[in-house]
Image (spheres, coloured by chain):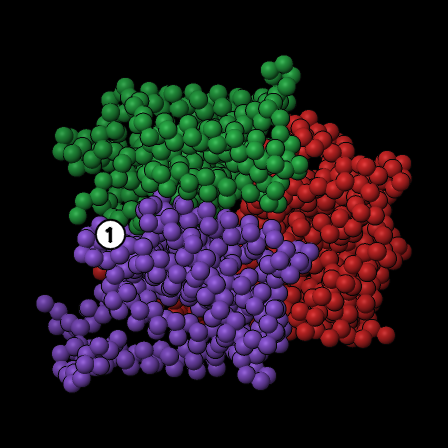
Amino acid sequence: MRIEQDVLKILLAALLLMAAIPWTAGKLSSDIFFEWPFFFEVAIGGLLAGVMYSLVALGFVLIFKASGVFNFSQGAMVLFSALTLVGLNELGVPIWLAIVFTLAIMVVLAVVIERVVLRPLVNQEHIILFMATIGITYFLDGFGQTLWGSEVKLLDLGIPNSPGLYFGGQILINDFDLVAALIAGILVISLAFFFQYTRIGRALRAVADDHQAALSIGIPLKHIWVIVWAVAGIVALVAGIMWGSKLGVQFSLALIALKALPVLILGGFTSVPGAIIGGLIIGAGEKLAEVFIAPMIGGGIEDWFAYMLALAFLVFRPQGLFGEKIIERV
Amino acid sequence: MLYREAGEFKATYQADQAILTIRQDRWFMLALMVIAFLVIPLISSEYWLGTIMLPFLILALAALGLNVLTGYAGQLSLGTGGFMATGAFAAYKLATSFPDLHIFLVILLAGGITAVAGLLFGIPSLRIKGFYLAVATLASQFFLIWMFNKFGWFTNYSASGVISAPPMAVIGDSYVTGPYATAEAKYLFVLSIVVLFALMTKNLVRSNIGREWMAVRDMDIAAEIIGIRMLPTKLKAFAYSSFLCGIAGALWAFVYTGSVEPLAFDVNRSFQILFMIIIGGLGSIMGAFLGAGFIVLLPIFLNNAPHWIGLNIHVDLISHIEFMVFGALIIFFLIVEPHGLARLWQLLKEKLRLWPFPY
Amino acid sequence: MSIKRIKTSIIAAAVISGLIGASAALAADSQFVGSLVYRTGPYAPGGIPWADGFADYIELLNARDGGINGVKLELEECDTAYNTDKGVECYERLKNKGSTGMPAVMPLSTGITYALLDRVVADKIPLITSGYGRADAADGRIFPYVFVPPATYWGGADIAINYIANQEGGYGNLKGKKIALVYHDSAYGKEPIKTLQALASQYGFQFSEFPVPHPGLEQKATWLKIGRQLRPDYVLMWGWGVMNATAIKEAAAVGFPREKFIGVWWSGNDADMIPAGDAAKGYKSLQFNGVGSDFGVHKQIKSELYEKGKGSAKSAENTGEVAYNRGLQSAFILTEALRGAMAEYGNKPMTGEQVAWAMDRLDISADRLKEVGADGLFDPIKLSCADHLGKGRAKVTQWDGSKWVAISDWIEPHATMLRSMYEASAAAYAKEKGITPRDCK
């Protein structure tokens, strides 16, 4: 992957600021407790949380990249997949089989969405397709709950949630977060591999570059869309499993899409590595801000800070850090 | 046969510039106004006026505001909820700091304050476009809600951070806020404001400002080349849009609910308003109303429908079905007419012109 | 083709709207009871058991006694999904149903409560907010139609501090202790802050606040601050929905002892403990009702409803959940008020105003609780024209990994201090809204 020079500069500046601002804040204000081990603890916790955001953001990126659709229903897909998985498990299906079934259901869902929603709306403006995915969101929310009910369900994968002390007992890192980060890492590497080295992956990239050119050299656009939605469904399932075992499987899972949006604009709508790096920056940035800046202005700033941070990056790179440069012609 | 331009002779420039050039359209609008101002308050129950018409009108006003920004000027925004909250809190501070201020002034000034907030948050739009801008405006949404939640000054230091509208009258004893305001008074008050601003907006988008907005929407580089200055044009759109949203927020807090907490204007509200203008039709005054009708009235209708036809279904199932049908209808309407309900309305009128002899 | 579709849909709409008028006929001699519930939406896990408890108690009266004094109760639910817009619509939809309209409204949401404050005054329908809503509505002179038994958030905060003082061996030992509050950053979560600040200055403990933005899916930063930096002696929580389980899990993740972590009643639902799993063991919560299903009223519900397949909840096992018991209690308060109103106005369906009259004189004694088999499940309540709260007591309970166990008796908050706070706050509200306090002799 080739990184443009100004991206590197921006990243470097961001890293410096992230360390410098808390340090200065700690020096200036007595309210703020600053120590390097604690700083790194917060930063690492933030990076790991950021990976969890990336998991959700990835689904958005895949679909936007291949079809230019801003898929609002990604959150609903996360909820739906997790509900289905747990629902099947509660019916007595063993967990591994339930995962297989859920994967199959997500693929069927992708086929249905392509047939019923995307195909009749082909060539429409972005915002119309966006609105159509909102229709899908409502439908999935209602459908998932009709099938599986609105009660909270426990999804226990047996991942330990105990605090572990690392680096000479100075820095506390949660085991669950480490496992989650590991899984997300594996997912990203396999996706990158899939995009880079398989036939379908190459076709996907061709479609992302230029729909018409891809069609003219014989890439079947409809199949590509089904594949991409199916892959997004699988990513949603992984996100659903990870977030579901963290929060319990319940309606609120659909709300995590809001945490993925700043990641998305920061990294760029069209870049898989952007979703990861965006997640890391947003995760670390918002946690550091909440711990080291918030006490001065009243706390609870995490949510808007993530968006403000993304906004600050956008001012320098309007297409996100790794997004394709927007070229405008008259 | 009757509904057509041909045969309507215009003798003055004023007649030539009228909003409604066809006689039947003018009659229709007149009839609509008579129905809205006289018939509906006379025949509707309190439930219809206070619970269905009131939120419909107020949200239609907010949708109108967003439609100016998104539909006419092409700037996608998800900050509507934040701007509505600004309007509501500004109105509250004005009404409690200056108890003698007339409610009309309170609401106008609240809109003005919101316009200033809109100006500030509109600045990034000069560099950021499309969905990037939409997500970036969420920054203003979350920030504004956090701010009203955090600083006690905005709520006069109430323990829960909830604002509550003092009783205010338009003239004499006819209260439009507080417990003793009748649903009819509230409805007529809101209706007048909404009609006033709809008319103003209609004229604004026909003026040179509106044409500038549309040029920017269609292609901003081209617009810049023909001499439209980006900064003032985009900021004007943000200011006017937030002005309308602020008024809608003030009406929501004062006239509709009476007491609100900042969470009443959370991000879901922003999404709701955006859905309205997409479903209703981007770049159309009518679309804001049709969209608000679709998003506000349809779920209520779907929720009530099983009851009306005598089906005794459990409430949770009704809600789930409501979601599914609502989602399916959104997709259905988009497939039938991707350019929104307003476009359907326009098509209907086109057909009427040719009726009964289509070629 | 689209025109044709429009025509069809217009005809369909006309047919359906014609049916609206036809459904107005309802039985004239039964008492309508409207219930605003949230069985769907992000908070449904806590709303479902409440709705079941409420419905079961009403149905129990119908099945066992044929209603109240021979007046059958007719329950209708309306799903709000915890959404204020929908809640207001539900209220307006239900308020005029039945022969006398809705006798009282229990909106079960802070947002809806605020949206209804003005409306209930105009409609003369009592608004009963059990353990939520405006704490200062305890002052019945300024809020004639709002009732807050059995407890308020301010009282809850006071009870939590009282319990901590007990644990530490008296209020004197609170000096220098660090107590933190983790709260949902909304009107609801902010309610206890003023009380806690007042108590902090009175008893000399150090109080710090940690707001969590709605909906509270991510609290790592908050808990790193609490668990690794501040290291408080106790943490209180005013959380809601998914925020509760996340907070408990994060507390476990930073190694904060759950035994020193006390939530308000809305942070003490069974549904919130399930996703937290083992992490929740030892966590404490205030409750304004008893826990478990070993009470007489549960046995009657099981034999009258569940054994005949008429229960609302999925199975009889769900009847002991905390939220279920709260639903029972709300239904109990409402039906007791209906009884009181009927004693004055005769055995017929009651209007909201008549129920408000009875609520002003509500007296649920210990004997009455024994009679219905709720001794120890609910606390006796006695209201008056000026006092719309009662004693405002609550218990502390602890999660043992599978159920709640009561670990204290009813704890009474500082009545005089809180009363003066209620009155001051209500007076400020009255001034803002131009309300003249009613005379309570």
Left or right of B176? Residue C414 is right
Relative vertical location of residue B309 with respect to residue A202 in this rendering, above or below: below
Q: Supply the letter of whichever chain is purple.
A: B
Q: Residue at x 19, y 68 (%)?
A: B350
Residue A140, quarter of the rendered image: top left
Q: Residues within 10 Å of mark 1 (few under 14, many from 20)?
A: many
Residue A170, quarter of the rendered image: top right
Q: Secondary structure at mark 1?
A: helix
Q: Supply the letter of whichever chain is red.
A: C
Left or right of A253? Residue B227 is left
Q: Position of residue B279 (x, y in %)?
A: 34, 57
Q: Position of residue C399 (x, y in %)?
A: 74, 34
Q: Is residue C290 visible?
A: no
Mark 1: amino acid: Asp
Q: Residue at x 31, y 55 (%)?
A: B231
Residue A45, quarter of the rendered image: top right
Q: Residue at x 66, y 49 (%)?
A: C189
Q: Colour of chain A?
A: green
Quadrant in the picture for the N terminus of chain A: top left
Query: Which residue is farthest front?
Result: A28
Chain letter belonging to callout 1? B
| Pick the front one: B265 or A62 | B265
Relative vertical location of residue A14 with respect to residue B342 in this rendering, above or below: above
Q: Which residue is mark 1?
A: B220
Q: Position of residue C208 (x, y in %)?
A: 71, 41
Relative vertical location of residue C12 with respect to residue C175 in this rendering, above or below: below
| Pick the front one: B108 or B18 | B108
